[in-house]
Image: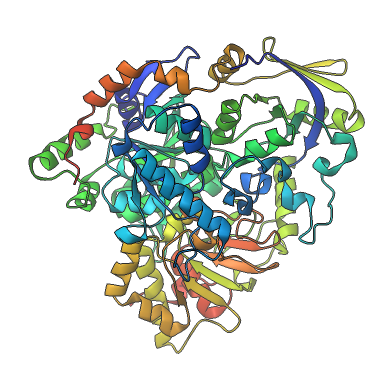
């Protein structure tokens, strides 16, 4: 059992009671709500004749279903419009703040929480979405929940939870040029497996995380769930506090100083004990790309696609064979032999301003070398939030993308899960900065997804095939 | 809430590791604002071609219609937290799941619906899948008190987290009322958390 870690401190501070089942009743400090997993939950609260217990701790937005080309209401898709009206009605009736287009703060739920300073160290955070683990970047305990649990948090601000184990994942040394936080987490998932994290919270630590920006830490924590870990976190430090200072909902004045003092005390100290510790060298990590149908089926850009015979576990081999069948790829192929049809930059993994800057830097290099989006490739950029979009436009990033032939869109989840008009067609293959390459994930049952960093997606868009981003060194 | 102690039903195997919730229910069916029609959609894209023709999938086979115990492999239900996934299985007729392992959010969602998601060893799951395929008409008996799954003449040992088992056995798997019973304690914890007092503007 882990002791004295941030996980333990936050868990204990939020433990309300032990339930008759033996589970812990855990208080939830921040509840984020989006349009897809909440309508049934609000209905259940209504049916039980209950209210939202802490409406001021609950924030809603819309992201999954919103179109990104024209965001005019009513939406063209009647189902999307009905879903919008449901969240409007529900937030109004239950007194929940709704961050819609009019507020200028709409965006992917895991992008706007941190951006608005709602996400703060030491909190417990829940949302009806598995990538809630993103918020762990701030030293929170944040996890995705199902709709019946959304009901519980709405009605009681609590969840019935089983405790987790804690695995500390250290990455020490210095990341090589061109290697991004996305590559780090793809590497970790490749090593520990897509179910390696079941039962664990991941604590990310070591030099690589100490020197990583908050946005990079969010990218890593975001994909904890792809490694099976329901939560992942980085201990709060000066980088965290600097990011939070002055944000809309951050504490101000004297409260700020007290908050920082409190937050500092939450970090796992030298006395912390873990259920497990694993260590990796930052220098071993190369730009990564997935080739299969789980986020763990990835290789370094300099490697070749694996051979099923090399896996002795029959289940693993079966999964790899299914992956080859679906992806229409061959063992031994080099990544740069894989041509792409679509390039998607966005999502709660990589739809923040630093991601857009990194991608734009590659595109700018390409433009200098006379390149544009390769013929036959559809390329588009979807900022994670309205505020990210605004910032990017102030920096002129949109014109760099547009000059090269990328489309510049409104904020939303877009082709990350394709519950909106942004979908692959037939067996198109995408280079995507999102987090899931599951069969059918991007809207077409036979569609194929290659996950990589946003800079790598930009490089692939320019060449029309998977490309080592280091061919476009940042100026 | 009903107490769930024993489930007797026919089995249906779904073979393969890492079957994610996008495969269990494609995102386009998440556009509906109620769960009422979810029973039409489980494994939709694995069961039907884009033109609507039936593919080879156990949920399509006549011998498994009316089955209630799903037998799956490892990391079942990984990926998205969508409760639509267990909802679609349950509304299709699944009342319990036996697998080598589950993604946690999925297993938790199952319990919230009063559906046991129990674990059996890899070898046992393989044997059960094989047996069910040969005897699709036979009843399996999942006994949550004895933690045993009876399959023909065999009894297989099954496991699940004790807390979740208690919730099912005691009929407290719909947790809202349990949580609400501690209203005073909720307020006490809320008052003890520094961030609850910070000015929000
Ligand atoms: S961007 Fe993708 S992973 Fe993130 S919340 Fe939206 S759909 Fe989910």
Whole-percent x, y for residue B76 in the image: 65, 37
Who is closer to the viewer here, A154 or B89? A154
Residue at position x 45%, y 83% in the image? A404
Who is closer to the viewer here, A455 or B177? B177
Whole-percent x, y for residue A86 in the image: 48, 48
Q: Is residue A377 above or below residue A29?
A: below
Who is closer to the viewer here, A148 or A318? A148
Residue at position x 67%, y 48% in the image? B23
Q: Is residue B97 above or below residue B30?
A: above
Quadrant into which the N terminus of chain A falls: top left
Residue lying at the far left in this picture: please name it.
Answer: A254
Q: Is residue A271 above or below residue A79?
A: above
Residue at position x 41%, y 63% in the image? A411
Is residue B70 visible to the viewer in this orientation of the structure? yes
Q: What colour scheme was applied to this rendering of the protein?
A: rainbow
Q: Which of the 4 image quarters holds residue B99?
A: top right
Who is closer to the viewer here, B190 or A103? A103
Residue lying at the far bottom in this picture: please name it.
Answer: A370
Q: Is residue B197 left or right of residue A386?
A: left
Quadrant into which the C terminus of chain A falls: bottom left
Whole-percent x, y for residue A80 in the image: 53, 57
Number of marks: 0
Q: Is residue A17 left or right of residue B161?
A: left
Q: Is residue A27 above or below residue A62?
A: above
Q: Is residue B142 left or right of residue A352?
A: right
Q: Which of the 4 image quarters holds residue A163?
A: top left
Is residue A173 visible to the viewer in this orientation of the structure? no
Whole-percent x, y for residue B181 in the image: 40, 15
Residue lying at the far top in this picture: please name it.
Answer: B146
């Amino acid at each position: 059992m882990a002791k004295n870690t941030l996980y333990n401190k936050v868990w204990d501070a939020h433990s309300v009671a032990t339930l008759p089942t033996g589970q812990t009743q855990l208080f939830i400090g921040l509840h984020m709500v989006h349009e897809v997993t909440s309508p049934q939950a609000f209905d259940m609260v209504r049916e039980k004749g209950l209210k939202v217990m802490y409406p001021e701790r609950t924030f809603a937005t819309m992201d999954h279903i919103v179109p990104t080309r024209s965001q005019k209401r009513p939406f063209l898709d009647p189902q999307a419009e009905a879903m919008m009206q449901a969240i409007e009605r529900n937030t109004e009736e239950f007194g929940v703040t709704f961050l819609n287009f009019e507020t200028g703060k709409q965006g992917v739920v895991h992008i706007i929480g941190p951006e608005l300073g709602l996400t703060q160290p030491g909190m417990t955070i829940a949302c009806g979405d598995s990538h809630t683990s993103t918020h762990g970047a701030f030293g929170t305990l944040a996890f995705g929940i199902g709709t019946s649990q959304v009901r519980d948090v709405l009605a009681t601000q609590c969840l019935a939870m089983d405790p987790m184990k804690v695995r500390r994942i250290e990455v020490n040394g210095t990341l090589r040029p061109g290697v991004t936080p996305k590559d780090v987490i793809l590497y970790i998932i490749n090593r520990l497996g897509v179910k390696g994290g079941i039962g664990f919270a991941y604590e990310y630590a070591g030099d690589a995380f100490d020197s990583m920006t908050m946005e990079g830490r969010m990218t890593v924590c975001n994909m904890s769930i792809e490694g099976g870990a329901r939560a992942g976190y980085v201990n709060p430090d000066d980088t965290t506090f600097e990011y939070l200072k002055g944000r809309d909902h951050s504490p101000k004045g004297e409260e700020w100083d007290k908050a920082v003092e409190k937050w500092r005390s939450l970090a796992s100290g030298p006395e912390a004990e873990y259920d497990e510790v694993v260590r990796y060298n930052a220098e071993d990590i190369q730009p990564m790309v997935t080739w299969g149908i789980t986020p763990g089926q990835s290789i370094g850009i300099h490697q070749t696609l694996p051979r099923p015979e090399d896996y002795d576990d029959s289940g693993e081999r079966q999964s790899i064979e299914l992956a080859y069948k679906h992806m229409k790829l061959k063992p031994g192929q080099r990544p740069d032999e894989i041509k792409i049809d679509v390039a998607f930059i966005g999502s709660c993994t990589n739809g923040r301003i630093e991601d857009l800057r990194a991608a734009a830097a590659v595109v700018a290099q390409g433009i200098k070398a006379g390149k544009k989006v390769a013929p036959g490739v559809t390329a588009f950029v979807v900022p994670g939030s309205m505020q990210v979009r605004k910032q990017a436009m102030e920096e002129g990033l949109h014109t760099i993308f547009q000059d090269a032939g990328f489309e510049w869109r409104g904020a939303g989840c877009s082709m990350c899960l394709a519950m909106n008009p942004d979908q692959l067609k037939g067996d198109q293959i995408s280079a995507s900065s999102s987090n899931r390459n599951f069969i059918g994930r991007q809207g077409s049952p036979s569609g194929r997804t290659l996950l990589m960093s946003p800079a790598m997606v930009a490089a692939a868009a320019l060449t029309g095939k998977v490309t080592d981003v280091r061919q476009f060194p940042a100026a | 809430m009903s107490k769930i102690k024993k489930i007797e039903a026919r089995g249906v195997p779904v073979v393969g590791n890492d079957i994610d919730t996008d495969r269990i229910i494609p995102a386009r069916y998440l556009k509906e604002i109620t769960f009422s029609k979810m029973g039409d959609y489980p494994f939709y894209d694995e069961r039907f071609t884009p033109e609507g023709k039936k593919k080879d999938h156990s949920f399509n086979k006549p011998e498994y219609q009316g089955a209630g115990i799903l037998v799956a492999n490892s990391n079942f239900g990984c990926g998205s937290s969508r409760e639509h996934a267990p909802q679609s299985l349950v509304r299709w007729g699944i009342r319990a799941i036996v697998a080598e392992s589950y993604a946690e959010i999925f297993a938790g969602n199952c319990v919230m619906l009063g559906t046991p998601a129990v674990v059996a060893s890899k070898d046992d799951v393989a044997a059960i899948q094989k047996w069910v395929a040969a005897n699709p008409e036979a009843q399996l008996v999942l006994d949550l008190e004895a933690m045993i799954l009876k399959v023909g003449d065999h009894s297989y040992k099954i496991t699940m987290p004790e807390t979740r088992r208690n919730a099912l056995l005691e009929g407290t798997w719909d947790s809202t009322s349990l949580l609400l019973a501690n209203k005073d304690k909720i307020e006490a914890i809320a008052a003890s958390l520094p961030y609850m007092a910070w000015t929000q503007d």
